[in-house]
Amino acid sequence: MTLGLLSQYVFNGLMLGMIYAMVAVGFTLFFGVLDVIKFSHGDVLMVGAFTGLATYLGLQAAGADSPLAQLLVMTLVATLSMALLGALIAKYLVLPLRLAPPLNTLLITLMLGSVLREVVRLFYPQGSNPKPYPRLLPADFVSFGSFTLRADSMILLLAGLAAIVAVHLLITRTKLGLAIRAVAQDAETARIMGINFEFIVLLTFAIGSGMAALGGLMNGLYYNEVNFGMGLLLGVIGFSAAVIGGLGNIYGAILGGFLFSALQSVGAVTLPALFPGTSTAYKDVFAFAVVIVFMAWRPTGLIAEKKSERV
Amino acid sequence: MNLKRNAIVSLMGVALALAAGAACAKQTVKIVFIGPLTGGVSANGIGGRNSADLAVRLRNEDAKAKYSYDLVSLDDECKPNIAVQVATKAAADNSIIAGVTHYCSVTAIATVDTYHKFGLPVVVWGAVLPSITYANKFAEIHRVNGTMINQNEVAAKFMSGMKYKKWVVIHDTTDYGKGHNQYFSEYLKKNGGQIAGTFGVTADQQDFTTELTRAKELKPDVIYFGGLTPLGVRIRSQMEKLGINAVFQGTSGIKSDAFIEGLGKQLAEGSLSFIEGAPWEKLPGGLFFAGKYALQKYNEAPEAYGPFAFAAANLIMDAIEKVGPNRKKVTEELGKTKDRDSIIGKITFDDHGQNIVALITKYVAQDGKWVVWEDSEYGSGKRKLKGQ
């Protein structure tokens, strides 16, 4: 294997890992503040990607055709509307079930995911077909041997990194972040300290869902194709990544995202080499099998949430 | 006065009786049409139904025909369970002598046992899975259209004729994708092509960069994809991302407008696909068929497989004309079909009832449309595929 080829694999892995990390951060945020698992997260990502696409088509029809302006408006509309959707989900589906068994929240969000998927499939024009995503980023590239570095992929990678860093700064450096951390640590004490519990929960869900929308846009701009089913597997992978990292910890989620994409790449490259005749379709089997083994070894994930169980 | 009126009435009565007698001279024979008349692929099913209906109407207009025919049409919804129900209904009805059956492979394969058990001779008009005719040796099952075997045979011969040497095969791991991989690889080897790598992928996979990076290392001239449109769109699009400069060769599975819409004109340009059948303009009896079809003023188009349903219905009625309305005799007679002229060209059934003179059309994506290769600017040499 040449160096160029290796770099290509690493770059592909980084790109994929970034998308996984963005989904995983959402899962970890929700779990952090409310101890809930919101399984519709992947589908919110998909709706975000489609919202971006619809905005683009709208802009195109209105005659606004500067790629930069289109990109900005798309990002803004998709992120804000998904943030709103996330907050609505939290307000009307998650919070009312706060005192019910966690299984109920899990089920209700799982069902919501199916609803979102089917709604896009049935009501978006020709929704069951894959949709082309606009190419708004510069397509220049440089080749180093068998490694092709494209400007658009690089921009997406940096944008993803910036989004994650921004969320991190928001949580660690601002007063709002302090409130989120306080709620995550102990909701009741936080309330006594005068923190508006409901507002903080809604805000956290809005941030997580906004991140998902960004992830969806990145996914669309990177693959130049979106479809109604894209959120399903991304949701499961993002959740696994968050769990490997340690649910409730942002660094863990990022680490988990990259680890999962690395596992997939390693699986796809080495499995056919080690066992001739195996198809690369087994890469997911490999990655998820490693996750299972890993969970048996470290049930709390790579970076466990530092807290003792409330009694 | 009264007498006169009575005379007139009785005269009219005699005239009516005579007219009715002439009409009743022919015995009515029922044949069944089964296809997807509702659901996602209903356009194809209704086109097939209309075409079979057209064949029946033309035959009934023919004064020389010994029988008068009645077409019963049933809806299989493209679902195997429904297909078995309607197939049983048709097969259990002894007044039905033969059937023009199924567009979807899943329904056609699900019902072969039913037809065999009840001894109802059928001619498949649209489904392409090889096993429908080849998994068993049921005398009742025949097929006028080609299979993915024919499709890949033509594809392999055509592509090696273009002086391409090295392929990478990507296929989905369903029976459909695996079948394509198997037959294409087989025929490519016979034609001297080399397959540098084969990748089986899941039917809902999103990211193909790892497989494609590996493929890029193998430096293929052509990437062959055995699967359906959604995956085809992703693979073609990600090939571009990784800078893979190879021809994208698909199967009948990507010959849809959704493929071009999903990729956009530019990226789809120069993609190839191979499909059983042909647009009616290209069929030997296409002009005749289209003219007669237009005269009947159906609301729907015949679609790609309509002419096959027409040919299948004619084949059945020819057999009934010859041996009479008897299922056993019709089965036997259909089995003997050899070099029979039809609007889709010559029909010859092998010992499995499969038409071996299958018609395959090559398509290339040009300016946002699937164009028949021979009519395209690629075919005329005005444009060149990659690596030419």
Image: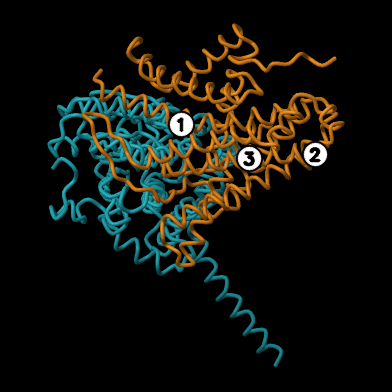
Chain colours: A orange, B cyan
Residue that badge 1 annotates: B205
Residue that badge 3 annotates: A209
Quadrant of the image occupied by residue B214: top left
State if disc 3 and disc 1 touch (CB < 8 Å): no
Q: Are marks 1 and 3 on the same chain?
A: no
* Amino acid at circle 2: Glu
Image x and y of residue A18, in percent? 48, 31
* Amino acid at circle 3: Ser
Which chain does the numbered disc 1 sit on? B
Q: Residue furthest bottom?
A: B1
**Is B136 placed left or right of B216 in the picture?**
right
* Amino acid at circle 1: Gln
Q: Are marks 1 and 2 on the same chain?
A: no
Name the disc covering residue B17, or none: none
Residue depicted at x 43% and y 55%: A68
Image x and y of residue A3, in percent? 26, 21
- On screen, A236 above or below A208? above
Q: CA distance from mark 2 to mark 3?
A: 16 Å
**Observer-nearest of B92 and B239:** B239
Name the disc covering residue A198, or none: 2
**Mark 1 surroundings within 10 Å by alpha-carbon count, few (fewer than 14), some (14 through 19), many (20 or more):** some
**Observer-nearest of B180 and A194:** A194
- On screen, B22 above or below B271? below
Q: CA distance from mark 1 to mark 3?
A: 24 Å
Q: CA distance from mark 1 to mark 2?
A: 38 Å
Which chain does the numbered disc 2 sit on? A
Mark 1 or 2: the one toward you: 2
**Is B186 placed left or right of B252 in the picture?**
left
